[in-house]
């Protein structure tokens, strides 16, 4: 997969969230206008700020803030919504990431673990209502 595209209302807050939560950095920050973006999106007069963020050479997030046309309102997805519902990340320390998430304005839906205790999983809301699944793979004892 090349990247995940996310349309946001507050692009500065979204940039801060992805930087502070997961360590993404801005790779490209540009305003797109003109015939090519109009042709791509099949709409005249598009103005969009596109911020491409990278965590490593394989993990990218593309944040899009449309100035024209205005962003269409959509209800926040739930775990039961049709279509793409969440982004999942493996994290080294779930407790630290949950604290970071809450400090950045996110919320925890639920936390559980596998029957054998090998993983701990949290389902959460991140910036602008995006559903996140955070997974910590636990060290298994060999005794």
Image: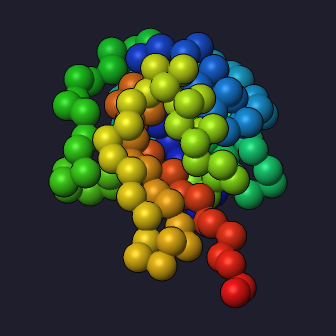
Q: Is residue 86 visible?
A: no
Which image quadrant is residue 42 in? Answer: top left
**Foreground residue, 31 or 80?**
80
At 43% from the left and 50% from the top, the residue drawn is: 122
Total marks drawn? 0
Q: Is residue 108 visible?
A: yes
Among all residues in the image, which is located at the extreme bottom? Answer: 143
Q: How was this image coloured?
A: rainbow
Which image quadrant is residue 124 in? Answer: top left
**Foreground residue, 89 or 121?**
121
Among all residues in the image, which is located at the extreme front? Answer: 143
Q: Residue 3's spot in the image, x, y percent?
A: 60, 51
Q: Quadrant of the N terminus?
A: bottom right
**Foreground residue, 108 or 118?**
118
Q: Residue 6's spot in the image, x, y percent?
A: 47, 36
Q: Quadrant of the C terminus?
A: bottom right
Q: Residue 84's spot in the image, x, y percent?
A: 33, 55
At 23% from the left and 44% from the top, the residue drawn is: 78
In the picture shown, does residue 89 fall above or below 142?
above
Say whether residue 86 is left or right of residue 2.
Answer: left
At 39% from the left and 25% from the top, the residue drawn is: 128
At 48% from the left and 79% from the top, the residue drawn is: 116
Q: Residue 58's spot in the image, x, y percent?
A: 74, 57
């Amino acid at each position: 997969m090349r990247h995940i595209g996310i349309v946001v209302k507050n692009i500065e807050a979204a940039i801060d969230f992805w930087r502070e939560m997961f360590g993404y950095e801005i790779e490209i920050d540009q305003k797109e206008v003109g015939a090519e973006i109009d042709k791509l999106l099949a709409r005249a007069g598009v103005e969009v700020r596109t911020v491409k963020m990278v965590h490593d050479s394989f993990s990218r997030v593309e944040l899009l803030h449309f100035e024209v046309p205005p962003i269409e309102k959509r209800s926040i997805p739930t775990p039961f919504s049709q279509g793409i519902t969440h982004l999942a990340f493996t994290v080294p320390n779930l407790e630290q990431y949950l604290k970071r998430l809450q400090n950045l304005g996110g919320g925890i839906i639920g936390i559980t673990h596998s029957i054998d205790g090998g993983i701990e999983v949290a389902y959460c809301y991140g910036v602008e209502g995006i559903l996140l699944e955070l997974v910590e793979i636990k060290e298994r004892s060999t005794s």
